[in-house]
Image (cartoon, rainbow, N blue to C red):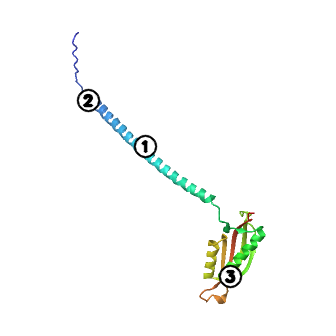
Amino acid sequence: MPKLNLRLKLDLNREQLLALGAFCALLVICALVIANALLAWAEATQARDDRRDQLASLRSRVGGVAKQRQQTQTIAAPAPAFLDAATSGLATAQFQAYLSQLITDQKAVLVSSGIQPAEREDKSDAIRLQVALTATIPALQALLYRLESGTPYVFVDSLSLQLGGSTERNTADPVLKVTLTVHAFWRRPSA
């Protein structure tokens, strides 16, 4: 077999050396761009995984809140929260008597009370009353506290205050004319 003598003659001129240098520089730049793209891809993957973890955490929290809401919604109000009466008229009378007693207990004076017409969003089991009374500020505070914290559940829809008269403005505890719009719920007693 004849021996091949391969000899590479590197007789390059200046233009060829510049072209070879540019090619090598292009290869280095391409390698750097690829490395930078891989690094950016790895960071984006890590950020995506972190966001997935955050989303899973938020979903578990929201799921817990939703379960708490369902539990809260399924728990019925206690029986004393409602006015028990056979008809809405009896429930209204019971509600007026309750308010009258509560106002008297707080050393306020009941001027009048009357049924308010039902509003569009009211349910059929809602009783709405408007009550006019005179009371001092401490008596009014105690009355409002007892209304909203006691049973049956009473909700204050509106409150209007006015000074009681020109002669009472100089006293330490002025008498106020108060108009309250309140509502409560009734239900028929179970047989």
Decide if residue 24 is in sight here.
yes
Q: Is residue 135 left or right of residue 23?
A: right
Dot 3 and dot 1 residues touching (CB under 8 Å): no
Q: Of the two numbered discs 1 and 2 on the same chain, state the one appearing first in sequence.
A: 2
The residue under the point 62% across, 72% down is 149
Query: Which three-letter amino acid code belongs to the residue tagged 3?
Result: Thr
135 vs 148, nearest the viewer: 148
Residue shown at 31%/35% (left/top)?
28
Q: Which residue is mark 3?
A: 104
Q: Secondary structure at mark 2?
A: helix
* Residue 33 percent across, percent down from the top left: 36, 38
Instruction: Judge from the rendering whether residue 92 lies leftward or rightward of residue 174; answer left or right.
Output: right
Indicate which label's residue lies in the foreground, 2 or 3.
3
Q: Relative to 79, does residue 14 appear above or below in the rendering? A: above
In the rendered view, tell whether residue 115 sits above or below residue 57.
Answer: below
Which amino acid, by three-letter code, is at mark 2?
A: Leu
Give the residue pinned by disc 1: 45
Q: Position of residue 117 (x, y in %)?
A: 76, 69
Q: Quadrant of residue 118?
A: bottom right
Q: Which mark is residue 17?
A: 2
Residue 6 location, quadrant: top left
Q: Quadrant of the N terminus?
A: top left
Dot 2, crowdedness within 10 Å: few (<14), some or many (≥20)? Answer: few
What is the distance, in whole Å, between disc 1 and disc 2 at their CAs?
Answer: 42 Å
Q: Earlier in the sequence, mark 3 or mark 1?
A: 1
